[in-house]
Image (tube, rainbow, N blue to C red):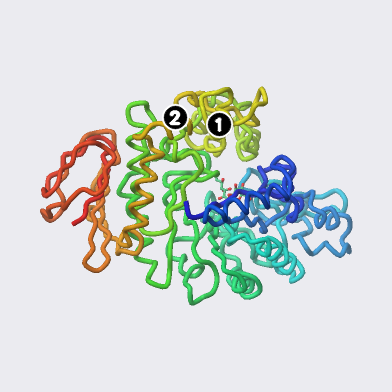
């Protein structure tokens, strides 16, 4: 790896697993001390890697000193650090909803006013229109950058600017409010100011979590001539078919269309990211592959080939290099995630959906699928802890799927990732080459080229559990195979016999 993005490690009551920060300059007790952080940073640098921290400044914890002060009284000097409004006829100020179920407003007994929280009640939104707040954020960023940190992944950064009139969101945003929340009037002013005040003064990388930003709008945040961010996460691919906690059918042509559209939007002044999983989404092999014993390894390798040969900076989520799978959740008590628990209360306990339906969907969509402890070996708790019980149950398949097994098995997904990364690092065309989807409508094959001058590569992926006889479009004869996830090498032909989850990189 070139770099590591660390989810929030700051002092937090963990209402939302660290995305609710109580003290930005203190390390979370569960993780250790500042000395341990410094030792880790030193070790990362010694290994010639970079460290990105998670910058969560759309909101804080309600236990942060600023909010403790702010809620005390309407004339408290910290009142304007957050967003307080009077109710409307005994109801919340407007129809804004929280991503974790219910209204985005909570009435506070101390003053009777409501405060805004787009996520949990324990995550009040900061008021970025207050220059004091912005300066506080810039100072805490400098605190970590002065320690030698190399950049930030920025949590829901498009949400930081709110329409000061706080109008109801129009009906067409039902179920997709992220696009309304990401359209605040001053988001670009504030990110450009952040760039001027902080980012431009350090050699850093930034990636924004742009939930609610369309592919078309991407250049507004990442075009280098705008001095905002280096890149963003678009969610069109990873959330394909998702409707809140439900997963509706989706097709491969729909997935492929995301990459073609993104490629069309990002000219030479722009750059993108490639990811199919993270801590907010289920395991990649279970979501986009086939995690059955027969095809788990092959499909994980095929998806890895896609991640490392598409255009954009690839992000690999911890454990996916082992092809860790979703967890066999059976009951609500199995879950830790506030998003799950709040929706249980809001939708199951109110009999809008049955517990069976809800739990069955969560086995496919819940964030906790990706949060089960890292599986290091086949000992108790997957070697994650010596305590009798881990904070979240370890996947029962940790005896077969673990780092020790993967490192020992030359044919493991882990070693295949290493080959892919080595290939990408010595093949500029796989990084900077032009991208072209050769067969956008094919229902199960993803075939695309990467071309840099005279250097041309073809990637052919059978993203299904069925064998396919594939005719390379326009009768082009494929060149020599430079990497494949399955034995056997077909070359110099235009008819490919693709086995289930067959993945091949050809040099034209
Ligand atoms: O996530 C924002 C976001 O996109 C998700 O919350 C998403 O709405 C939801 O998980 C869909 O299932 C960021 C962080 O990545 C997430 O972990 C935090 O919970 C959230 O912001 C609040 O900080």
- Place residue 298 in its image quadrant: top left
Q: Are marks 1 and 2 in contact (CB under 8 Å)?
A: no
Write the residue at 74% across / 42% down: 29
- Point out residue 242 in the picture as x, y percentages from the top left corner: 46, 44
Left or right, 125 with reference to 369: right
As displayed, is residue 115 above or below residue 387? below
Q: CA distance from mark 1 to mark 2?
A: 41 Å
Left or right, 3 with reference to 338: left
Q: Which residue is mark 1?
A: 353
Q: Which residue is mark 2?
A: 405
Q: Residue furthest front?
A: 46
- Point out residue 233 in the picture as x, y percentages from the top left corner: 49, 56
Write the residue at 37% across / 28% down: 292
- Place residue 30 in its image quadrant: top right
Q: Secondary structure at mark 2?
A: helix
- Point out residue 220 in the picture as x, y percentages from the top left corner: 49, 70
């Amino acid at each position: 790896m070139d770099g590591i993005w660390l989810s929030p490690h700051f002092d937090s009551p963990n209402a939302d697993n660290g995305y609710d920060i109580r003290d930005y300059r203190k390390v979370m007790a569960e993780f250790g001390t500042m000395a341990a952080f410094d030792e880790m940073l030193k070790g990362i640098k010694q290994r010639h890697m970079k460290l990105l921290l998670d910058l969560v400044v759309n909101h804080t914890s309600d236990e942060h000193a600023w909010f403790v002060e702010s809620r005390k009284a309407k004339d408290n000097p910290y009142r304007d650090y957050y967003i307080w409004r009077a109710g409307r006829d005994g109801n919340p100020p407007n129809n804004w909803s929280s991503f974790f179920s219910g209204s985005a407003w909570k009435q506070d007994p101390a003053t009777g006013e409501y405060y805004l929280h787009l996520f949990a009640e324990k995550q009040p939104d900061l008021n970025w229109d207050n220059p004091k707040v912005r300066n506080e954020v810039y100072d805490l960023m400098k605190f970590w950058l002065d320690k030698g940190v190399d950049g930030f992944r920025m949590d829901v950064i498009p949400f930081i600017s709110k329409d000061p009139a706080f109008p109801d969101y129009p009906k067409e945003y039902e179920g997709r409010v992220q696009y309304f929340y990401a359209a605040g009037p001053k988001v670009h002013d504030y990110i450009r100011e952040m760039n001027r005040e902080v980012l431009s003064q350090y050699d850093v990388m930034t990636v924004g979590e742009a939930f609610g930003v369309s592919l078309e709008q991407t250049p507004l945040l990442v075009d280098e001539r705008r001095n905002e961010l280096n890149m963003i996460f678009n969610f069109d691919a990873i959330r394909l078919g998702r409707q809140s906690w439900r997963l509706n059918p989706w097709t491969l042509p729909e997935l492929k269309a995301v990459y073609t559209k993104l490629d069309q939007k990002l000219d030479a002044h722009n750059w993108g990211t490639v990811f199919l999983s993270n801590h907010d989404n289920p395991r990649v092999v279970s979501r986009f592959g086939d995690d059955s014993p027969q095809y788990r390894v092959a499909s994980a390798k095929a998806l890895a080939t896609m991640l490392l040969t598409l255009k954009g900076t690839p992000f690999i989520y911890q454990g996916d290099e082992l092809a860790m799978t979703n967890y066999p959740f059976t009951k609500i008590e199995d879950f830790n995630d506030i998003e799950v628990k709040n929706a249980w209360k809001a939708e199951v306990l109110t009999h809008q959906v049955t517990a069976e339906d809800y739990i069955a969907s969560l086995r496919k969509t819940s964030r906790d699928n990706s949060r089960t402890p890292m599986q290091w070996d086949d000992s108790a708790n997957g070697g994650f802890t010596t305590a009798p019980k881990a904070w979240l149950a370890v996947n029962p398949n940790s005896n077969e799927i673990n780092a020790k097994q993967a490192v020992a098995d030359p044919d493991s997904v882990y070693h295949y990732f290493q080959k892919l990364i080595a290939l990408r690092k010595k093949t500029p065309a796989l990084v900077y080459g032009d991208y072209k989807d050769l067969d956008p409508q094919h229902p199960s094959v993803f075939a695309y080229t990467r071309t840099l001058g005279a250097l041309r590569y073809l990637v052919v992926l059978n993203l299904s559990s069925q064998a396919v006889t594939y005719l390379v479009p326009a009768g082009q004869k494929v060149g020599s195979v430079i990497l494949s996830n399955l034995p056997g090498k077909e070359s110099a032909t235009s008819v490919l016999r693709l086995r289930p989850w067959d993945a091949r990189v050809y040099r034209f």
